[in-house]
Amino acid sequence: MENNFTYATGRRKTSTARVYLTKGKGNILVNDLPLEEYFGREVAKILVKQPLVLLDMLEKFDIKVKVSGGGSFGQAGAIRHGIARALEKYDVDNRPSLKSAGYLTRDSRKSERKKIGLVKARKSKQFSKR
């Protein structure tokens, strides 16, 4: 059996996206829903399409994504990362433009853990000497 898809994983914060790229007409399915239905805000939709718009391949591929964890913008960032990695795997010539745009770099920022004795990660109760 021949593989007719390209697979890549994208991550952002606590979200993980598994991206499957196949030749097609530009349909993007996220967790079996169209992109427009899955993300309510327009900014998240634009974020997901950025690597495809950069390479002018918006109408070339059908993309199927399984994403889990995190919030909507973390998931959108994870999908963008996964699509960029899949496009790089599909054709190595795409790498320089994706790399210079910063889409291949994993954004490693995560929320800091809460510490004992504090209200949040850094917020503490107001100090009073008396």
Image (cartoon, helix red, strand yellow):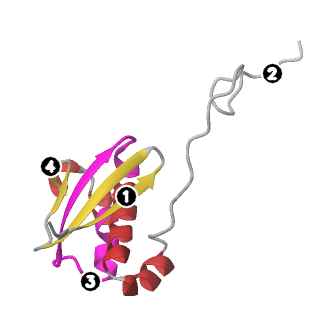
- On the image, numbered disc 4 is attached to which residue? 32
Q: Does the magenta stretch include residue 122?
A: no
- Report the side of 124 relative to 45 (left or right): right
Compare marks 3 and 4 and give the one earlier in the sequence: 4
Amino acid of disc 1: Thr
Using the image as rendered, state which of residue 13 and residue 37 is in the foreground.
13
Of circles 4 and 2, the one toward us is 4
Q: Residue furthest top?
A: 130
Name the residue that disc number 1 marks.
9
Say if 107 sits above or below 54 in the image: above
- In the image, residue 60 above or below residue 127: below
Quarter-wise, where is residue 103 in the image? bottom left
Magenta range is 47-74
Residue at x 46%, y 84% (from the top left corner): 96
C-alpha separation, residue under disc 4 versus residue under disc 2: 51 Å
Residue 45, horizontal then vertical, whole percent: 27, 60
Q: Which numbered mark, 3 or 4, is in the foreground of this view? A: 4
Q: Which residue is drawn at 37% across and 40% down?
A: 69
